Amino acid sequence: MIPYIRRAAALSLVLLVALLLNAARVQIVEAPSLDKNPANRRPTMARYAQPRGDIVVGGKAVTGSRDTRQQLRYERTYTDGPLYAPVTGYASQTYGTTLVENAEDPVLSGTSPLLAPFPFWNDISRTRRPGGTVVTTIDPTLQRTAFEGLRGRRGAVAALDPSSGRVLALVTSPSYDPGELSGTGKGVADAWTRLNATPSQPMLNRAIRQTYPPGSTFKIVTAAAALDAGVVTDVDAPTGTPDPYLLPHTRTALPNEATGCGNASLAYAIRWSCNTVMAHLGVKVGLTGMLDAVARFGFNDGRLRIPSAVARSNFDRDMTADQLALSAIGQYDTTATPLQMAMVAAAVANGGDLAYPYLIDRTTTSGGRVVAQTVRRSYGQAMQPSTAVRLRQLMLDVVEGGSGSKAAIDGARVGGKTGTAQHGVGNMGTPYAWFIGWAQAEDAGRPAVAVAVVVEDASANREDISGGGSAAPIARSVMEAALRGEEAESGDRLTPRNRPGWPFRP
């Protein structure tokens, strides 16, 4: 009998070892593929089994979580959804995540190793921490001012702190409520279909994902290139540009909207936006010089992140002389995002040093412990400091006595540049109205804000659209709000809660 018992015991032991090995194979070796199997709903259920961390603007959460008591338990909610949609994006149980919801998903969902109390804790425990908090650099007053200024017209506003690179406002219009896409079911699917079918494209982030011909606002880049290259040494000296100016090697005459552009100086050309002068200077700088200049401002950079990806602003690398002339005045194939043009204004305002733009100030655990803090870094020297000084004065002249007078603010120094960009077949499309600029309080040591505004209102009359008329008033209201905020902050240094990005406590 004993030999039979021993054989049965040995067989049982072999079977037990086989079971343990199979369990180890399933749980360790095959776990990654099983987790990714579309038929496995456990990772999805675990993802929505706890509230998502919040995105914070100006010390207040603009997101939340709602307990649906369904299998996918917690659903994302948004406060002032259309206002902050260009910042937050959406977090949908059906369609995934975008923008900050996507870029900071590991922190918000609680899966980031940074949230764990010990290294490799998440891997060992196979659990997730409570969702962390993402604190943005957005100033809620500037954000709302820009949003209300657009009044539902198609367009965008981007505002930066020139010295640090903090994104103070990021607005696109028309907008949408990301809360409509948070859950599952027919209502969410219908909202998705409706939003994608709407001609005005409310889900398009025009501030960072749409590029436009920048028109005459690009002349600031061309002017910087001409000054840095020594093509212009005296901004008040005649440039020798004829009016009309024939595009090189063609019989096409380049027109001017302004008068007095024949043989005009760079200062006059910037103040009144002379196409002929700036096109001529772009050709004199040459393609190589222009490519070097535009790269220093951020053009042709497809890796820009804030941390959401920013569409690549374009300046062609291979052009004939006539194409270069048009590109130098922001036409032909030259395109830019509003954020890119705000970077141009910020570089001038900050003495030529372009700060890398960023939207996230810091991320924290649910308890408030800081796990990551963004520090200021330089994108590079966009132009020589002496060039920036001269361009600051030229942009001041545009507002004080030129085409950008509607951006003037009493008691402040405001520099700007207007632009009206042609587009469409034969330039018959409704022009885009642009304004870029910066503002500095009279008693301040540095500019408070740099801003770019683009308006593409197809309902307006073509003759009524101009950067000075459509975009400059919006920019002025945003700059005024920034100056008021700076004044309030300097007047109450002991109350840091007035400052954008004050630590949030759930």
Image (cartoon, rainbow, N blue to C red):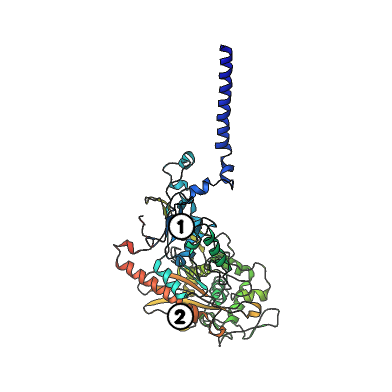
Residue 445 appearing in the image: yes
Residue 393 appearing in the image: no
Q: Which quadrant holds residue 360? A: bottom left
> Residue 457: percent from the left, percent from the top?
54, 77
Instruction: From the viewer's perspective, tell me whether residue 311 is left or right of residue 443.
Output: right
Instruction: From the viewer's perspective, tell me whether residue 363 is left or right of residue 196.
Output: left
> Residue 465: percent from the left, percent from the top?
53, 82
> Residue 334: percent from the left, percent from the top?
61, 71
Q: Dot 2: what SS?
A: helix
Q: Identify whether 28 is placed above or below 62.
A: above
Mark linked to residue 332: none
The amino acid pointed to by label 1 is Arg
Judging depth in this view, the residue of 72 and 265 nearest the camera is 72
Circle 2 Cα neighbour tier, 10 Å, few/some/many (<14 / 14–19 / ≥20) = many
Q: Dot 1: what SS?
A: strand
Quarter of the image containing the C terminus? bottom left
Q: Identify whether 326 is placed above or below 303.
A: below
Residue with the most extreme top position: 1
Q: Earlier in the sequence, mark 2 or mark 1?
A: 1
* Residue that appears at 59% across and 81% down: 275
The amino acid pointed to by label 2 is Val
Eye-nearest disc, 2 or 1: 1
Q: Which residue is the site of mark 1?
A: 76
Q: How many marks?
A: 2
Quarter of the image containing the N terminus? top right
> Residue 3: percent from the left, percent from the top?
58, 12
Instruction: From the viewer's perspective, tell me whether residue 83 is left or right of residue 22.
Output: left
Q: Identify whether 260 is placed above or below 407.
A: below
Judging depth in this view, the residue of 72 and 112 nearest the camera is 72
Q: Which residue is the site of mark 2?
A: 399
